Image (cartoon, helix red, strand yellow):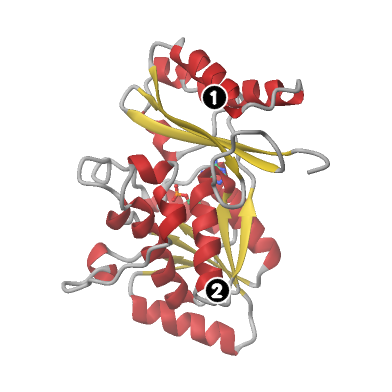
Amino acid sequence: MEIIETISRMKSICQEEARAGKTIGFVPTMGYWHEGHLNLIRAARRKCQVVLVSVFVNPLQFAPQEDYQQYPRDLSRDARLARAEGVDYLFYPSMEEMYPQGFQTAVEVRELSDKLCGKSRPGHFKGVATVVLKLFNIVKPDAAFFGQKDAQQALIIKHMIDDLNLDVELVIMPIVREEDGLAMSSRNLYLNPKERRAATILYKSLLKAKELILGGERKASTIISQMTQMIEEEPLARVDYIALTDADNLQEADVIRGKILIALAVFIGKSRLIDNLILEMPGA
Ligand code: AMP
C-alpha cells in the first residue's frame, strides 16, 4: 500500500489505473477509523479493482467554535488498518495541498444543506460538498462509498452528483453500531464513561419512534414529543434537533407515510452526536 501526499501524484496514479482498465473504488474519510469506515472499505474492496481511501480532516466543514483542532487523528493506526484491509492507496494531503493560498471556490447544494444539521452547522455542507467534489476530481472514482450514518451528507452528495453530471456511482452503506446500539463515530472518543452510557439514548429514542409507528402512530409531532421527553429524562443529554422527514428530500413530514427518515442530533455533555433510522411504510 502506498501513502500519497500530493494531488499531482494521486492524479497520475489514478489516471494510470484507469488507463489499465481498472475500476477505482473511493472512500473519503476524516480518519481515526472504526468499523463503520472499515465496512465502507470492505464494500469498495468487493466491488472495485483498486481501493483508494482518503484521510483528510477538512477545515472547511468546521465552524470556528467547533472541534477541528481536537478532532482525533492517528495516521499510523489508520495506515495499519488500511494494509490489513487490502487498501491500495491512502491519500493523505495536507491542508496547504488541498487549500493553497488564494483558494476561493465553493460548491453548495442549497436547499438540502439548510435543513437538519445545516440549521445548527451553517456552512458545514458547503464545506463537505466542496471537498468531496475536489476529491472526486482528483481521483475520478468509478464508485464512491458513504455511510448512512450521515444521512443528510449522503443525500447532498447524491444531489451534487446528479446536478453536476458526475460519472460516479454512489454506494450508501448501513450504519454500523456498537453492541448497545450507539452508532460508531470517531467523536465517541470524546465521551467519558458516564457520557458513553448516556449516549445510548439516541438509538433508544429512534427505536421508541419505530415502536410508536409500528403501533399505528402517524402524527410526527406526537412522535417527536415522545422522543424529546425520553431524551430529556437523561440528565447528560440535550436535544439539538429531532426531525421526521421524507427520506428522499428532507421535507418535514406531518404525517408518517412513504419512506421516512427519523434523524436527530443530541449533545451528550459537550459532544454533539447524530443518528438516524429510515422506515418504509407499506402500501405508500
Ligand atoms: P468521517 O470519517 O466521519 O467523515 O466518515 C467517513 C465516512 O464513514 C462517511 O461516509 C460516514 O458516513 C461513514 N461513517 C461514519 N460512521 C459510520 C457508521 N457508524 N456507520 C456507517 N458509516 C459510517
Res. 21 image quadrant: bottom right
Q: Quadrant of the C terminus?
A: top right
Chain-order first, disc 1 or disc 2: 2
Query: Measuring 49% from the left and 75% from the top, which residue is drawn there?
Result: 164
* Viewer-nearest residue: 222 or 185: 222
Res. 142 image quadrant: bottom right
Query: In the visual, does 84 lie left or right of 153?
Result: right
Q: Position of residue 253 (x, y in %)?
A: 59, 38
* Residue at mark 2: 141
- Above or below, comparing residue 208 to residue 259 in the picture: above
Res. 246 image quadrant: top right
**Residue at disc 2, secondary structure:** loop
- Above or below, comparing residue 95 to residue 196 in the picture: below
How many C-alpha atoms fall within 10 Å of the one at disc 1: few (<14), some, or many (≥20)?
many
**Residue at disc 1, secondary structure:** helix
Q: Position of residue 162 (x, y in %)?
A: 56, 70
Label at residue 224: 1
Asked whether residue 84 is in view, the answer is: no
Residue at the left extreme?
101
Q: Position of residue 128 (x, y in %)?
A: 39, 58
